[in-house]
Image (cartoon, helix red, strand yellow):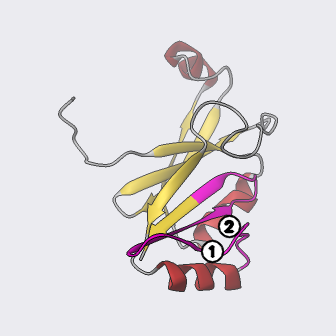
Amino acid sequence: MADLQRPVLDVGLVVRDFDRALAFYRDKLGLAPTRRLSMDAETARRAGIGSAAFEIQYMQAGEANLKLVRFQIPPPPGPAGTDGAAGYRYVTLWVKDLGKTHAEWRAKGAEFPSAPIRRTPELQMVFLKDPDGNLIELLGP
């Protein structure tokens, strides 16, 4: 294992409608926008991560960052659901009070496909969808 500088994993999320995604993660989920940076097309090509320029908005989620990635021409949507394709399919946020968080975010308009499900006596889970249909798992008591 590499000697990590930070004990967390940041996740990059390509979004189709940047303003809508930013509003969702900031206003409904309460993630704080921090820094924003751009990558030019040549650097993206040389790094092997894309063929066009893009912008990244960092959204602080505890010690980690959810990085909203905006291309000038949004790529087509991918298949929905965890069984839609191989690869990263959702992110998980651990919360201190799942029932309270679920109620607060529902009141703000977050879309939950189900009510919280009790996995063990001390742990519940529930998924919600962002504006592009990406899944976010909440875990907590």
Instruction: Tell me the SS state at disc 2.
Output: helix
Residue 136 vertical position relative to residue 83 in the rendered view, above or below: below
Q: Which mark is residue 23?
A: 2
At 63% from the left and 30% from the top, the residue drawn is 86
In the displayed structure image, the side of residue 63 where residue 124 appears, left or right: right
Q: Nearer the viewer, residue 36 or 1?
A: 1
Residue 55 vertical position relative to residue 137 in the rendered view, above or below: above
Contact check, label 2 and label 1, Cβ < 8 Å: yes
Indicate whether residue 112 is drawn in magenta: yes
Report how many numbered discs are placed on residues in the image.
Answer: 2
Counting from the top left corner in percent of width and height, residue 40 is at 59, 27
Q: Quadrant of residue 135?
A: bottom right
Q: Give amino acid for label 2.
A: Ala
Counting from the top left corner in percent of width and height, residue 85 is at 69, 32
At 67% from the left and 66% from the top, the residue drawn is 24
- What is the quadrant of the C terminus in the image? bottom left
**Which residue is disc 1 drawn over?**
27
* Residue 59 visible in the snapshot: no
At 59% from the left and 16% from the top, the residue drawn is 45
Label 2 and label 1: CA atoms lie apart by: 5 Å
